[in-house]
Image: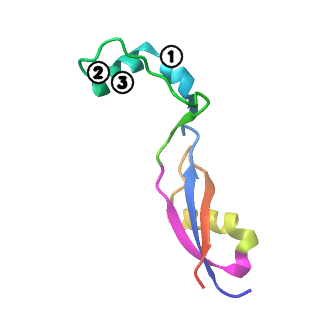
Amino acid sequence: MQGKLIVTYKLICDNDTHEAISLETILKNEKILKAIKSEFAKGVRNIEITSNSLESQILITTEKELYTFEADKQDFADLIELAEEDARKRKLFKKGCDAIQLIDFETIS
């Protein structure tokens, strides 16, 4: 198995945010409803805000920078270790940020 992979990863930190909020919960919040009405229905009275799918979720996550490196296809089983090594070389690991998450890998040849 010859060729190369482009591997993309991001750092995982202790204080990262990952919240999932249902659309139903959002539409029950009076402040949010007022903001939606004032932004999209100015001057209109007696309106109701509904959704077809209340089970939909909105994710609030910490925005992260993505890092990439190149690896041999033969090293596929070691991609996590290679990504950690790349992060160490770049001196990305800091207090509270000491893990990585693989985001993507694609074959380039």
Q: Position of residue 103 (x, y in %)?
A: 60, 59
Identify whether 34 is placed above or below 54: above
Q: Mark 2: few, some, or many residues within 10 Å (few <14, many ≥20)?
A: few
Alpha carbon of mark 2 to alpha carbon of mark 3: how far?
A: 6 Å
Q: Earlier in the sequence, mark 3 or mark 1?
A: 1
Alpha carbon of mark 1 to alpha carbon of mark 2: how far?
A: 16 Å
Mark 1: secondary structure = helix
Q: Position of residue 93 (x, y in %)?
A: 55, 54
Alpha carbon of mark 3 to alpha carbon of mark 1: how far?
A: 12 Å
Query: Farthest residue in the left direction?
Result: 43
Residue 18 in sight in this render: no
Quadrant of the rendered image containing residue 74: bottom right
Mark 2: secondary structure = helix
Residue 41 in sight in this render: yes
Mark 3: secondary structure = helix
Q: Cβ–Cβ below 8 Å for labels 2 and 3?
A: yes
Quadrant of the rendered image containing residue 70: bottom right
Which amino acid, mark 1?
A: Lys
Q: For this rendering, which residue is in front, 97 or 106? A: 106
